[in-house]
Image (cartoon, rainbow, N blue to C red):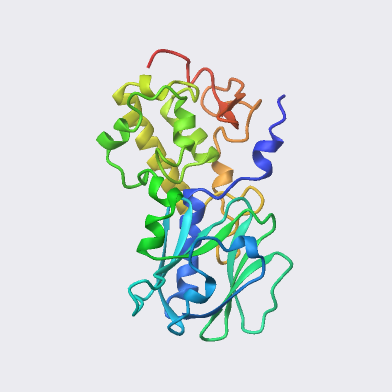
Amino acid sequence: MPDNGGARRSAMPELPEVETIARTLAPCLEGRAVAGITVLNKGTWQGGLAPGAVCAEGPRPVTGTGRRGKVLLVRLAPPAAPDGVTALAFHLKMTGRLFVYPAGTEPGPHTRVVFDLDDGQRLFFDDARKFGYARAVNPAELAAWPFWQKLGPEPLEVDEATFVGLFAGRSAAVKALLLDQTVIAGIGNIYADESLFRAGIRPSAPGGRLRADKLAALRRALVEVLEESIAACGSSIRDYRTARGDAGSFQNAFRVYGRGGEACVNCGRTLKQDKIAGRTTVYCPHCQPARKT
């Protein structure tokens, strides 16, 4: 049996996990204001706006939380200055976490940035592996951020015709295209494998050769998988937790991800494992046949 431990060992939070963190963080922050920021690891703070720019006008009320692709956003009340900070952006990468702690809580060994709130509570951005980052943004900063500008459409918002058009003329494997954040935002290894399985599409199939009806089926499967995972608070492989500290449960519903060498839940045949775009890929050769599509 192939060793699939690596596929399950660690996973970057994808759209459902970041969406869940945004939703569970909102009740902790809305009605509060960011009163100060302390950066404990210099490399964690990125972008052209310094931490001091956030509270240059005093404590900044939080108006909500959100997400763009895998980037989590904490939105702030409009600043008085036209070039003031309008939001905080976080990319969790592999091990980033955001929790609100009581007043007086000391940073932990993996705390990289501390956001002090106006009521004394403290929002910690913890990141054991230091791959994640935080940054302050405004319209000008977003316009100058190449990663943000190149993000593809949101999979839960894109219509069928636009989704089908994303793959036109592309020779890369359909899974590689799903993982490409410039094609469509927020999808990673878990939800690429799971949606392709439900749509009956071989992950290695060239995206540009798939029929429109197969791509439409893929869009439906992708939306279905993402919505189911959000309802389950995401997938906890090892590091991911919601802003309440809870684990997700969608990992209990995986049909292919991390299951190479096991039996297919549909046909009972052995699931195969391969590498596509450098990522471990699991599929069923019977339910996802190699054919002209």
| Residue at position x 54%, y 23% in the image | 284
- Quarter occupied by the C terminus: top left
Q: Is residue 197 visible?
A: no
- Percent of width and height locating residue 19: 46, 56
- Percent of width and height locating residue 20: 48, 58
- Percent of width and height locating residue 175: 48, 30
- Residue 175 horizontal side relative to residue 133, left or right: left
| Residue at position x 66%, y 70% in the image | 40
The one of 16 and 255 positioned closer to us in this rendering: 16
Residue 184 falls in which quadrant of the image?
Answer: top left
The one of 128 and 59 positioned closer to us in this rendering: 59
| Residue at position x 61%, y 61% in the image | 44
- Residue 121 horizontal side relative to residue 75, left or right: right
Q: Is residue 251 above or below residue 55?
A: above
- Total number of numbered labels? 0
Q: Is residue 134 visible?
A: yes
- Residue 67 horizontal side relative to residue 276, left or right: left
Q: Is residue 246 above or below residue 255?
A: below
- Percent of width and height locating residue 109: 74, 67
- Quarter occupied by the N terminus: top right
The one of 100 and 184 positioned closer to us in this rendering: 184
| Residue at position x 60%, y 64% in the image | 245
Q: Is residue 202 above or below residue 246?
A: above
Q: Residue furthest left?
A: 161
Q: Residue furthest top?
A: 291
